[in-house]
């Protein structure tokens, strides 16, 4: 059975939204037969969905950005990213001291 994937392309000047190509792979003769009416008007479909191109392959095409890392049990791997707030805390404290100093100087005059 054919698969449909999105291949993100580099943005160019004046792009209103990120450009992409529609990739159809694993398209054997059976799936090509069912896709044929759709593919005959591919230029129209391409324009309707905003793709830069429609690419059709019989082989499996791997797009690394579409791969989902899995854990040893085969479930999608979830990665939690936490920010380093220590530097942020220092910056906030410096700004508070600076503002406090300005207020203190303003009240002296």
Image: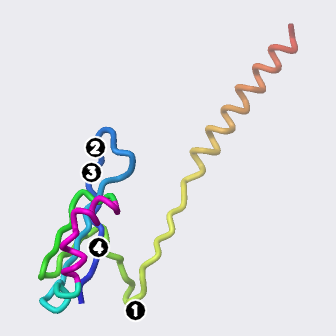
Give the CA distance from mark 2 to mark 1.
Answer: 40 Å
Q: Earlier along the polypeptide chain: callout 2 or callout 1?
A: 2
Mark 4 Cα shell of 10 Å, populated few (<14), some (14-19), many (≥20):
some
Give the CA distance from mark 2 to mark 3.
Answer: 6 Å
Q: Which mark is residue 10?
A: 3
Callout in the foreground (4, 3): 4
Q: Earlier along the polypeptide chain: callout 4 or callout 3?
A: 4
Q: Which mark is residue 12?
A: 2
Secondary element at tag 3: loop
Secondary element at tag 4: strand
The picture quadrant where one finds residue 67 is bottom left
Mark 3 Cα shell of 10 Å, populated few (<14), some (14-19), many (≥20):
few
Give the camera-side residue of 104 and 41.
41
* Residue identified by numbered label 4: 5
Mark 2 Cα shell of 10 Å, populated few (<14), some (14-19), many (≥20):
few
Q: Is residue 102 above or below residue 31?
A: above
Give the camera-side residue of 12 and 42.
42
**Which residues make up the magenta segment?**
35-49
Give the camera-side residue of 62 and 24.
24
Q: Residue 51 colored magenta? A: no
* Residue identified by numbered label 1: 73
Q: In the image, residue 50 lies at what x, y percent?
A: 33, 58
Residue drawn where x is 13% and y is 77% of the image: 57
Give the camera-side residue of 70 and 28.
28
Callout in the foreground (1, 3): 3
Q: Earlier along the polypeptide chain: callout 1 or callout 3?
A: 3
């Amino acid at each position: 059975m054919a698969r449909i994937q999105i291949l993100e392309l580099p943005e160019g000047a004046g792009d209103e939204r990120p450009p992409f190509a529609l990739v159809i792979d694993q398209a054997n003769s059976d799936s090509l037969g069912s896709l044929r009416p759709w593919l005959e008007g591919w230029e129209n479909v391409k324009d309707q969905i905003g793709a830069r191109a429609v690419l059709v392959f019989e082989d499996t095409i791997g797009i690394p950005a579409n791969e989902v890392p899995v854990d040893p049990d085969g479930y999608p791997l979830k990665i939690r990213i936490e920010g380093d707030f220590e530097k942020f805390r220092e910056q906030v404290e410096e700004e508070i001291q600076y503002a406090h100093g300005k207020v203190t100087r303003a009240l002296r005059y």
